[in-house]
Amino acid sequence: MSTPRFDSFAAFYPFYLLEHGDRRNRRLHFVGSTLVLVCLWQLFATGNAVWLLNGLLCGYGFAWIGHFFFEKNRPATFKYPLYSLMGDWVMYADIWRGRVKL
């Protein structure tokens, strides 16, 4: 199935949420995003660039496991990398706010 075309993030985000309908996938995204923040903290605290690589591995690794094993779909990152990255962080904030269930 092909991904629809989006001209704005506001139009993309509802699609993004549909692609994250499985609670296990959302949980993996949440864990991955939290670990990204930890890795960024470590990067700035130590100045060691390995934490940047660790952050990328955590963020994408947890998310892709959720998509391939639970959601059974292709991550939007491949077609909409910027919107997908923005969607990750908006969903992360929405989980903290209680707008998206974990």
Image (cartoon, helix red, strand yellow):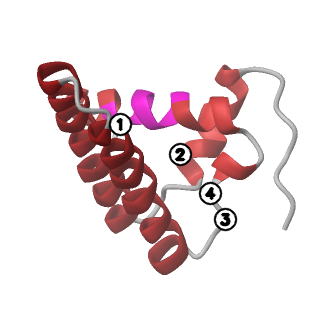
Q: Which element is circle 2 on?
A: helix
- Which residue position is annotated with label 2? 17
Q: Which element is circle 4 on?
A: loop
What amino acid type should be assigned to the residue bearing mark 3? Arg
Q: Distance between the residues labelled 4 and 2?
A: 12 Å
Name the residue rendered at 30%, 42% in the picture.
Answer: 50
What label sits on residue 16 in the rendered view?
A: none
Q: How far apart are marks 3 and 2 (CA)?
A: 14 Å
Q: Is residue 87 magenta?
A: yes
Q: What stretch is highlighted in magenta?
A: 86-92
Q: Which element is circle 3 on?
A: loop
What amino acid type should be assigned to the residue bearing mark 2? Leu
Name the residue rendered at 44%, 70% in the picture.
Answer: 65
- Which mark sits nearer the N-terminus, 3 or 2? 2
Of badges 3 and 2, nearer the viewer stands 3
Q: Residues within 10 Å of mark 3 (few under 14, many from 20)?
A: some
Q: Are marks 3 and 4 in contact (CB under 8 Å)?
A: yes
Q: Distance between the residues labelled 4 and 1?
A: 21 Å
- Which residue position is annotated with label 1? 52
What amino acid type should be assigned to the residue bearing mark 1? Leu
Q: Does the magenta stretch include residue 12?
A: no
Which of the 4 image quarters holds residue 38?
top left
Name the residue rendered at 43%, 27% in the picture.
Answer: 90
